[in-house]
Image (tube, helix red, strand yellow):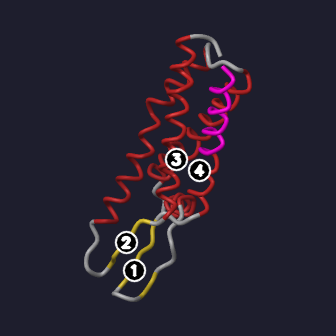
Amino acid sequence: MQSNRIGWILLWFAAAVFFGLGLWYPIMSSRLFFKFDRPDIYLWSSIQSFYQTDDWFLASLLLVFTFLLPILKWIYLGWSIWRGSSQGRLQWWLEIINKWAMLDVFVVAVILVNLKLSSLVIVTSLEAGVTYFAVSVLCLQGLSFWMARTSDNRNV
């Protein structure tokens, strides 16, 4: 149905915009000793920071689950919308990606918990980038669910 396809395109585009905003805006800010502000923390700069401090595992985990898998999923869903169907072997890959898609939320949560366990000396707060990134993940999940449900009922 044409109305489904228009809705899919809008949701797909919204996911891309929110993902971009999540990269553009900081995810955290921190203060040291009441008034000494530290530079804002961005998602990409945090990955670079982990690589620079030789924490390869965490940096790689963040890279794969906050960049690569969402981008692959976004590309696949866009291709499926254009093609008009999400059937076949690529659908199997999307199901695998969906199973791991919540790991990116888990990784962000672990980092936030780690930073939230700060003392009176360091105070951290969430910024708009976290919200934009979370909305992007929700848009991709919703789009994936909607397309799979529609495809199960009948061909697009």
Residue placed at 70% from the left, 28% from the top? 79
Secondary structure at badge 4 equals: helix
Task: Please name the residue that numbered disc 4 is placed on.
Answer: 19
Q: Quadrant of the C terminus?
A: top right
Residue placed at 52% from the left, 60% from the top? 129
The answer to whether the residues at label 1 and label 2 have Cβ atoms under 8 Å apart is yes
> Residue 122, located in which quarter of the rendered image?
bottom left
Q: Quadrant of the N terminus?
A: top right
Using the image, tell me which numbered label, if any, was put on residue 31.
1
Secondary structure at badge 3 equals: helix
Between circles 3 and 4, the one closer to the viewer is 4
Q: Is residue 79 above or below residue 1?
A: below
What amino acid is labelled 3 in the image?
Thr
What amino acid is labelled 1 in the image?
Arg
Task: Please name the residue that numbered disc 3 is placed on.
Answer: 66
Where does the magenta region start and end? 1-15
Q: Is residue 140 above or below residue 99?
A: below
Mark nearer the N terminus (1 vs 4): 4
Task: Please name the residue that numbered disc 2 is placed on.
Answer: 124
